[in-house]
Image (cartoon, rainbow, N blue to C red):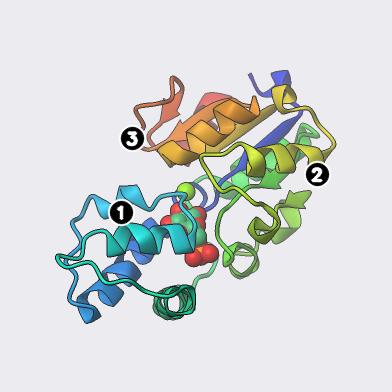
Amino acid sequence: MINKYKGFVFDLDGVLTETSKAHFEAWQELAVEMGIEVPEQTMDEVRGISRLESLEIILGYAHSPIEYSYDEKVALATKKNNIYLDKIKAYSPSNLAEGTIELLELLKSNHIGIALASASNNAPFLLKAMKIDHYFDAVVDPGSISKGKPAPDIFMKACEMLGLEPHECVGVEDAEAGIESIKSAGLHPIGIGKLLNCDEVYQDLKSLLDHLL
Ligand code: BG6
Ligand code: MG
């Protein structure tokens, strides 16, 4: 399968490292301070969703909705990010999903382009902290994308940065919104974890690696 494609475009959170829990816990801590109770399912609801859009999901759980100005929303999202940053500050290569280095090495040795299409503004920090930044030929800046996942923009941009057509690339995602983005951009979708909207799903990155070997 591996030589059918010229590029692999990865999501980060929940694919190359398990940060989804840290994102969720940070939202939960902010919500508690605001007197909002968020259910466990929120962890899946905010997968792949930008910081400000995730805040809207959290605010949606308030019993009596409060109108916040844009600046107030930015301040709340920044507060969540500071809680999140504290949770990931000691991240190191030990936080990589099992099989990450082997998979990236396998792709490199087959001359396959490697790109990152993460909605997270913290992605460059994590790539460096986990010492995998040098494997990436392209890292999309989510700030340069006008429409986040499930829109196709971020995966299309990753292919463009690799100098490849979407049909020449695979997209790897743990979020339903991410799989939608991959599909509408025209890459081959591969899901990680539990996904209902993708035909090719592996329980984790190691299982994908085993399949490719
Ligand atoms: C995605 C996560 O990768 O990045 C989302 O799955 C998160 O949960 C989004 O909201 C934005 O991340 P950040 O780090 O810029 O707040
Ligand atoms: Mg993800």
Give the vertical position of 167 relative to 163 (above or below). Answer: above
Q: Which mark is residue 43?
A: 1
Mark 3 belongs to which amino acid?
Lys
Residue in the picture at 51% in, 29% down: 190
| Disc 1 to disc 2, C-alpha distance | 30 Å
* Residue named by callout 2: 161
First of labels 3, 2 by sequence position: 2
Between discs 3 and 1, the one toward the N terminus:
1
User: Does dot 3 land on a helix, a strand or a loop?
Assistant: loop
Residue position marked by numbered label 3 in the rendering: 194
Closest to the observer, 149 or 126: 149
Determine whether 113 is above or below 6 in the image.
below
What is the CA distance from the residue labelled 3 to the residue labelled 2? Answer: 29 Å
Q: Is residue 127 above or below residue 185?
A: below
Tell me, yes or no, if residue 16 can be seen here.
Answer: yes
Q: In screen coordinates, is 120 left or right of 145?
A: left
Q: Nearest to the eye among marks 3 and 2: give it.
A: 2
Nearest the eye: 84 or 72 = 72
Label 2 SS: helix
* Circle 2 residues within 10 Å: few <14, some 14–19, many ≥20: some
Q: Amino acid at mark 1?
A: Met
